[in-house]
Image: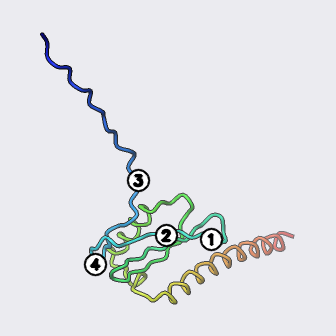
């Protein structure tokens, strides 16, 4: 006479941990900060946009393509701790679009300036 055979326990494995979609806002402390990316005209850059849903904080960064959300969040936190919030302030959606357009214009201008400097450099060499 033996004991009853125990059922085999299934091992439940957790999937890989995904990166966070919401972050804690360094200004108000709520977990409502989102970071979105937009494509830029220049393939060497992309535009990162950090927005807080509760306090209205909004920052736009021009970053390299390999930068992730966590990296942009750390840049934003560094700006807050360095007391450079004048660069990131609560704004309306119209002002946000203007900021993004200005960044895109600056990128296009820097590409044009580089081309003109190369042309000037070739003229001086002759």
Question: Which of the 4 image quarters holds residue 75?
Answer: bottom left
Residue lying at the far top of the rendered structure: 1
Distance in Å between CA atoms under marks 3 and 1: 26 Å
Cα distance between the residues tagged 1 and 2: 13 Å
Disc 3 and disc 1 in contact, CB within 8 angstroms: no
Q: Residue at x 44, y 73 (%)?
A: 50
Q: Quadrant of the N terminus?
A: top left
The residue labelled by disc 1 is 40
Across and down, in percent, residue 11 comes to 30, 34
Tell me the mark number nearer the camera, choosing from 4 and 3: 3
Residue located 14% across and 12% down the image: 2
Q: Nearer the viewer, mark 3 or mark 1?
A: 3
Q: Is disc 3 placed on a helix, strand or loop? A: loop
Q: Earlier in the sequence, mark 3 or mark 1?
A: 3
Seen in the picture, residue 43 relative to 56 is either above or below; the reply is above
Q: Nearer the viewer, mark 1 or mark 2?
A: 2
Pick whichever, 14 or 18, lies toward us.
14
Specify the label residue 36 is tagged with. Answer: 2
Q: Position of residue 20 (x, y in %)?
A: 38, 60
- State the separation of the CA atoms marked 4 and 3: 25 Å
Question: Percent position (x, y) of residue 33?
Answer: 37, 72
Quarter placement of the C terminus: bottom right
Q: In terms of sequence position, does the residue under pointer 3 or pointer 2 come before the other?
A: 3
Q: Earlier in the sequence, mark 2 or mark 4?
A: 4
Say which residue label 4 marks: 28
Residue at image mark 3: 18
Mark 4 or mark 3: whose residue is earlier in sequence: 3
Taking the view exactly as shown, the residue that stands out farthest to the right is 126
Q: Considering the numbered disc 2 on the image, is that residue within a helix, a strand or a loop?
A: strand
Give yes or no for contact between labels 1 and 2 (Cβ–Cβ under 8 Å): no
Residue under the point 74% across and 74% down: 117
Secondary structure under badge 1? loop
């Amino acid at each position: 006479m033996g004991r009853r055979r125990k059922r085999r326990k299934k091992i439940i494995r957790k999937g890989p941990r995904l990166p966070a979609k919401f972050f804690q806002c360094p200004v108000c402390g709520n977990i409502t900060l989102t970071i979105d990316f937009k494509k830029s005209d220049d393939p060497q850059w992309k535009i990162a946009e950090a927005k807080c849903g509760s306090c209205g904080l909004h920052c736009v960064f021009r970053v390299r393509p390999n930068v992730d959300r966590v990296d942009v969040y750390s840049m934003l936190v560094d700006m807050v701790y360095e007391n450079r919030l004048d660069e990131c302030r609560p704004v309306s959606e119209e002002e946000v679009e203007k900021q993004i357009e200005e960044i895109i214009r600056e990128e296009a201008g820097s590409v044009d300036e580089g081309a003109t400097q190369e042309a000037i450099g070739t003229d001086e060499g002759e």
